[in-house]
Image (spheres, helix red, strand yellow):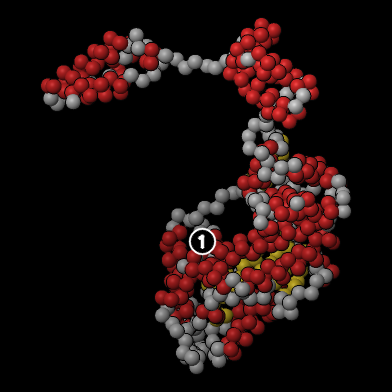
Amino acid sequence: MESNKRQSLINRFLKPRNVVDSGVSQLLPDASAETSEPDRAMTEAANEEIRAGWNTTSSVVKSAVKRGPYNVFSPDVRAKIGRFASQHGNSKAARQFSTELKISVSESTVRNIKRDYLKVLQKTKDPEEIDQLMHGVRGKPAKLGELDGQVQSYVRKLRMCGGIVNRTVVISAATGIVRSRDPSLLKENGGHIDFNRKWSESIMRRMGLSKRKATKAARNKPEDFDDIKATFLQRITTTVKENMIPESLIFNFDQTGCKLVPYSDWTMASRGDKQVEVKGLDDKREITVLLTISADGVLLPAQVIYQGKTNRCQADVTFPDDWNITHSGSHWSTVETMMEYADKILIPYCDKKKEQLKLKQSQKSLAIFDVFAAHRVDKFLDKLKDNNILVIFVPAGCTGDLQPLDVAVNDDFKRDLKAQFISWYSEQVEKALKQDEDIEQVSVDLTTSRIKPKHARWLIRVHSHLAMNTAVIISGFERAGICKAISEAGFSPPAEGPQQPDETETVGTTSVDRPGIFDVFSCQ
């Protein structure tokens, strides 16, 4: 037992260390620190053996030996070595070519070359035809095989001509190329190819390009976020309870910018480039879509805002009758567009829903939205108040955590919109290649006149799809904590409709708490 413990101590300290003799003692345990006499004696004995054997134990002082450089032989020399080794053996070939090339050629090197030579010989059957023996390709084969080169060629051409190059475009182009050449390779057709972020990074790396990310300021929560959240949710609970508001009349609306050509926040540039022009990030071709969701999982009709001064700037597409298609000078929401939104979407929906639930028109609704400038104008807030719509603002700087649309829905909306673009773009590439166009000459028209009506149809399609996904819509309210706040109100409207509070003045949260509410939820 003592022998094993002693050996364990020795092994513990007999590890390679690049130290001098004078430092040996500092590496050893202190025998005097042991609590019993046998342990002190055993520790001291082990220390003595280590000190005595320090200069003779190679494992302690041995330095790492660097390997020498590899010898790289040309294809014709490899062919000669392989032929000679197959006829005279590995050892003789190693001696022969060490003398001839005046470098050390190991037998293991000859063995590997001979193996490659015999593989080629099985195919050709004639040694005289083998005058070149190429090196093997390192790494795993490309997922696309021969098509990988065509995708790289297309991407380089797109980059050189100044076209928009981002993850979405690269994946779209690759999908179109594969569909035109061999669609059975795609996962959707039972194949093994499924383009994703990892693949896009791989092809960039192999093309000698690096992913360059655009920078933006980090979003930080306020230090007292927990208190702000608790106050915000308590206001919702109180408002719902005191005004007996059903879930179907609790709304959240928010604007989201949508690029006509979806982009990622990176582009491709040669490794080491200091200045990187990020294609697409400065593309001004953008519109604004204002989405509205209710706490019972309904997606209301959308407002779409184009940039321009007349209706001619709008897409020439037949939108759903209940949508609001408008424009502004900057494509962002203004007081005018918000008034249109209230008159054409929010108020009509509230009136219709009250009628369906057999509620009085004086029944209060609740709108939850952020403190964007166009939302805080008296004209708009008075419009909501006059139509019995109460207001609670999402705390400034907290929309990423407390606004349902930001928490869940907007990301799904944009992701589905991007998927529509990928599908269309890949179809254009596929169509061009099926017409026997050279991959270098394929060009997809992304001009505004071409892309705007297609983008409008994608909007309609994505909105319709999202409207059916009630779970995603409700999850936004749940993750923001609003569902729990509503349930804590303990209000369940009777079948014949709830009792109405006095219409003189709303108890608790009034329709608009201007301007104090901004101070309450200010994150400054």
In this orientation, which residue lies closer to the viewer: 517 or 225? 225
Q: Which residue is mark 1?
A: 401
Residue at the spot x=84%, y=49% of the render?
A: 442
- Is residue 493 positioned above or below 180 on the image? below
In the image, residue 509 sits, relative to residue 154, either above or below, namely: below
> Relative to the observer, which residue lies in front, 379 or 223?
223
Which residue is painted at 63% across and 18% down in the image? 110
Query: Does residue 54 appear anywhere in the picture?
Result: yes
Q: How many marks?
A: 1
Residue 478 percent coordinates (x, y): 49, 68
Decide if residue 16 is on the left or right side of residue 493: left
Secondary structure of residue under mark 1: helix
Q: Amino acid at mark 1?
A: Asp
In percent of width and height, residue 482 lies at 48, 70
Q: Provide residue 282's location: percent of width, then percent of height.
A: 74, 50
Left/right of residue 474 with respect to residue 256 in the rendered view? left
Residue located at (65% from left, 42% from top)? 202
Query: Counting other residues with Cα less than 10 Å from the Cα at mark 1, is it few (<14), some (14-19), or many (20 or more)?
Result: many
